[in-house]
Image (spheres, grey):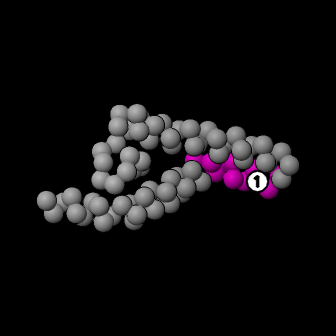
Amino acid sequence: MLFQVGGQGSRPTFFEMAAAQQLPASLRAALTYSFGVLALRRPFLHRVLDYEDEFFAFLMAVLETHSLRTTAVELKSSEAR
């Protein structure tokens, strides 16, 4: 998952690419911890923790789809060159 951070049409820096690669692991750990804390107060959230892998895969699919839809114009223009 790469995000365009540097502006219009600029190439991502090494640090932006490294951060984009570490984002899914950090996001997964943060969501697992957050749902664990919330599940202490709301027991029905334990069901989400039981299906943690599936829930995270669904969330990543939604984020990837959104990323591809918002950058699709840029991908098509770069293929035409």
Q: Where residue 76 appears, x then y in whole percent?
A: 24, 64
**Magenta includes 44?**
yes
Q: Does the magenta stretch include residue 15?
A: no
Element assignment for label 1: helix
Q: Mark 1 points at which residue?
A: 45
Left or right of 11 in this view: 32: right
Residue 56 image position (x, y, % from top left): 57, 50
Q: Mark 1: few, some, or many residues within 10 Å (few <14, many ≥20)?
A: some
Q: In this view, does 38 lie above or below 63?
A: above
Please name the residue shown 59% across and 54% down the image: 55
**Residue 79 placement (x, y as % from top left):** 18, 60
Using residue 8 as the reference point, say whether residue 67 is left or right of it: right
In the rendered image, the vertical position of residue 52 relative to residue 80, given as above or below? above
Left or right, 37 with reference to 80 = right
The residue segment tinted magenta is 43-54
Q: Based on the displayed image, in which of its 4 quarters is residue 15 positioned?
A: top left
> Which residue is farthest left?
81
Residue 1: tell me if it is visible: no
